Amino acid sequence: MKIDVTKPTTALLVIDMQEAFFEQPSLASQKERVVEHCNKLIRHFNKQAMPVFLVHTEHTLTHETWTLNMLDDKQGYLFAGDEHTRVVAGLLVGKAKHIVKIRDSAFFKTNLHHQLESLGVRHVVICGVSTQNCILQTAVDAYSYNFRVIVASDAIATHEPTLHEPALDLLERDYRQQIIDTDTIIASLKSLTPYIVPSKT
């Protein structure tokens, strides 16, 4: 039986919501707000049956995945299985698809691009941490793959507040990406038809 499926056009990318990043005092003070707004987006995407990708950073104990900074400092971090590498407490994981990355961008040496394309996604909403690092790099690479990007302004944070606005200004000005709050994003998505998973029969 052939089933007519309305594919989703929008996916949610939740970036690096891991305990390690919130150990820094400047991010720890923003943790409750970021988790709350990320969860609000996750709930809405789940309700609309639109895909949610939980992107997190993990490294191996050996040096294969280490960054230049880690190699220079002879010190690794965010090892798979470590307590501080786990998803931050309170974040709704649910049925989110997991993407493990080894650099700032969620697209670098991952299959995220192919997964998004296979689902018919053309727009991505990005939330998480940190603004000038993984949020910025993921958003720029999404642009390179011709995905339209919305950054959830109240569902992101950084440990370097002086770099927050310049990073968002760059994405908005040079990459024509939208920087808008969670409630506005949800209101704009409410009219979308839920994605119906095709039957295998």
Image (tube, rainbow, N blue to C red):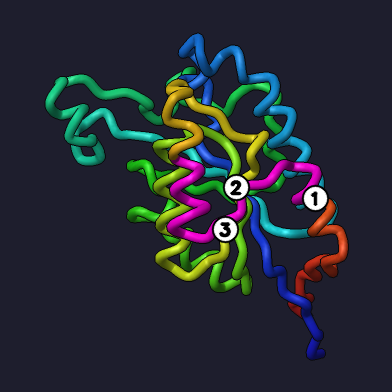
Q: Residues within 10 Å of mark 2 (few under 14, many from 20)?
A: many
Q: Residues within 10 Å of mark 1 (few under 14, many from 20)?
A: some
Is 134 rendered above or below residue 143? above
Give the label on residue 149, or none. Answer: 3
| Residue 119, image x, y percentages | 62, 70
Asked if residue 171 is among those painted magenta in the image, a careful observer would answer yes
Identify which residue is drawn at 55% across, 29% down: 157
User: Is 54 left or right of 185, judged from the image as shown?
Assistant: left
Q: Residues within 10 Å of mark 3 (few under 14, many from 20)?
A: many
User: Is 142 left or right of 5, judged from the image as shown?
Assistant: left
Q: Element under label 1?
A: helix
Asked if residue 151 is among those painted magenta in the image, a careful observer would answer no
Q: Amino acid at mark 3?
A: Val
Give the label on residue 186, or none. Answer: 1
Identify which residue is drawn at 52% across, 60% down: 176
Q: Element under label 2?
A: strand
| Residue 99, image x, y percentages | 49, 48
Q: CA distance from mark 3 to mark 1?
A: 14 Å
Dot placed on the residue nearer the N-terminal end, 1 or 2: 2
Please give the residue where the numbered disc 2 appears in the rendered image: 151
> Which residue is at the front of the view, 24 or 70?
24
Quarter of the rendering containing residue 195: bottom right
Total numbered labels placed on residues in the image: 3
Q: Are marks 2 and 3 in contact (CB under 8 Å)?
A: yes
Q: Start and end of the magenta stretch?
A: 167-185
Q: CA distance from mark 2 to mark 3?
A: 6 Å
| Residue 85, image x, y percentages | 46, 25
